[in-house]
Image (cartoon, rainbow, N blue to C red):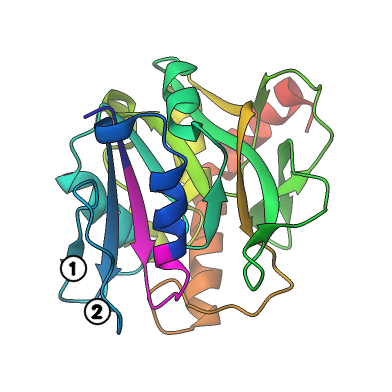
Amino acid sequence: MKLSVIIPSFKDPLLQKTIDSLLGNSGLGDQLEVIPVFDGYLPAIPLKLDDRVKIVHLGKNRGMRGAINAGVLVSTGEYIMRTDEHCVFGDNYDLILTSQMKDNWIVTPRRYFLDPVKWEVMDISPVDKMDLKIRGGKFTGVEVKGNGEPLEEATAMQGSVWCLKRKLWNDVIKELDTETYGPLIQDSHEMIFKIWQNDGKLMVNRNTWHAHKHRSFPRMHNNGTEENPARCEYGYAQAIKIWGDYYKEIKEKWGI
């Protein structure tokens, strides 16, 4: 298997459409597996049958981080990709991402905005690059202008779609830390910091793209846990506590 796509899922009605886009726009054919992880629930309407779809059902709700970890554990691909359950993808996205990947990279494609009602890409300029900042007591990505090259290094990503080699996950990420950060947030920053510490890079690949549901549309899920702002604030604070000094060290290098 070349690529395993993990989809942490919690009651989002757009999951099947996202899977349809992953399968329909694949260039890898039967070398692709899509792994939706039902985080403590079962959908009212079963997913369409497809040999490339491997369903994981968690009997207990674990939250987004735990669902991603569970999907990775059962995946078999040389590469691992994660996506939100409300996205569409460009033609041959999987072939492009895996063929233009170095061993120590984590890669995110160009990001457009999705109208989930019309199920089409909105006429809005894409996000081509993000810089890592501390705003409001938390790490966040701020949109900046890219250099226009097909591949460019960046310092932050939204985290809705990323791809990396399994070996990099096994050696460096190992698993997303739910004990320290809680079940939901700051996962992309955790990954990037760990990869940087091992001389890796975050890259934007503009040779392909995904479109993520625009924030102006109502949120249809809660990432798999009860809404709890205090829990999120705890996770933000933990990320600053763990990585704040390291961030200060590298700010000058990146000019951020």
Counting from the top left corner in percent of width and height, residue 184 is at 43, 65
Question: Can see residue 8?
Answer: yes
Tell which circle, 2 or 1, labels the residue nearer the N-terminal end: 2
Q: Position of residue 36 (x, y in %)?
A: 30, 59
- Please provide the residue range marked out in magenta: 5-16
Quarter of the image for residue 147 reads: top right
Residue count near mark 2 (Cα–Cα under 10 Å), binned few <14, some 14–19, many ≥20: some
Residue carrying label 1: 57
Which amino acid type is shown beneath numbered disc 2?
Leu
- Indicate the quadrant where residue 59 lies: bottom left
Q: Pointer 2: what residue?
A: 42
126 to 58, vertically: above or below: above
Q: Residues within 10 Å of mark 1 (few under 14, many from 20)?
A: some
Q: In screen coordinates, is 224 left or right of 36?
A: right
Q: Residue at x 30, y 80 (%)?
A: 45
Task: Indicate yes or no whether the magenta region holds residue 14.
Answer: yes
At 47% from the left edge and 57% from the top edge, which residue is drawn? Answer: 84
Q: Residue at x 67, y 52 (%)?
A: 140
Q: CB atoms at circles 2 and 1 under 8 Å apart?
A: yes
